[in-house]
Image (cartoon, grey):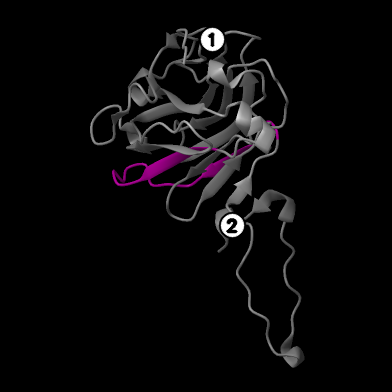
Amino acid sequence: MGLFGLGKKTTTPPPAQAAAVPAVNTQALNLTGISLAKGASTGISMVKADPTVQITAHLDWDGGTSGRRAKGADLELYVLYVPAADVKTGCDTTFNAIYYRNLGRLHDAPHIQHHGDSRVPGRETATIGRPDQQGYALICAYSAVGNGVGSFREYGAKAIVTDGRGQTVTVPLYDTDRYAYWVAIALVDFTGDGAVISQVEKYSAPGSEARPVLASDGQVLMDAGPVEFK
């Protein structure tokens, strides 16, 4: 079965035995698997009781054009999270964050670990373990003040989420907001049987350094968290 059940790997039989090849929704596929449309969601199946299951979240960016890179392209990956035990209805705010100043721990709570800072275009990565103990995780990016004016889309920023077992979701950005220091890119919802990944794409107010907040019910609140400055 192909990725997410979208297609099969087929071989071409001899001409005398040729058969019709099932159509594949190529608009939903790229080299890394599923690519989410704006506001779309998709699921990753997993055995939540298996403590070895890990979700890897990447923030990728190429810096955009050579001129854009020369002006600065230092982005930061943040993973805001709500543990399963803290999930509840309403909208209680939480301020849990894994990022370059708080790398977290993979084998102890919160079972989320950031793998280090990159000050140049490329990739930053965080691993999310123990999905049975996770409620929500929000993948965000922060643009250093030294980058000047420029949108996350111009930097080529996107999130890539994979379970390491053949299921990968790319979460692009579609809007151009040149005055935002923050973007909430993707929400990973662990509250069901597997994980549901949603394209969020919410931007901070112009000039606001306050990071987003992930509420206890999975709501994303922009400009509501501590102020960051880099």
Q: Which residue is drawn at 59% across and 33% down?
A: 198
Q: Residue 209 carries which label?
A: 1
Q: What element carries label 2?
A: helix
- Is residue 171 placed above or below 91 in the rendered structure? below
Q: Name the residue under label 2.
A: 5
Residue 7 percent across, percent down from the top left: 64, 62
Q: How packed is label 2: few (under 14 Cα within 10 Å), some, or many (20 or more)? A: few
Percent position of residue 45, x then y: 48, 47
Query: Percent position (x, y) of residue 203?
Result: 63, 18
The span from disc 2 to disc 1 (Cα, nearest Å) is 41 Å
Q: How many residues crowd mark 1 within 10 Å: few (<14), some (14–19), many (20+)?
A: many
Pick the front one: 48 or 112: 112
Q: Where is residue 223 in the image (x, y as percent from the top left)?
A: 56, 8
The image quarter in which residue 105 lies:
top left
Q: Can residue 20 be seen in this view?
A: yes
Residue 45 is covered by the magenta coloring: yes
Total residue callouts: 2
Looking at the rendered structure, the kind of residue marked 2 is Gly
SS for dot 1: loop
Q: Is residue 193 among the parts visible in the rendering?
A: no
Q: What residue type is labelled 1?
A: Glu
Q: Give the range drawn in magenta.
A: 38-60
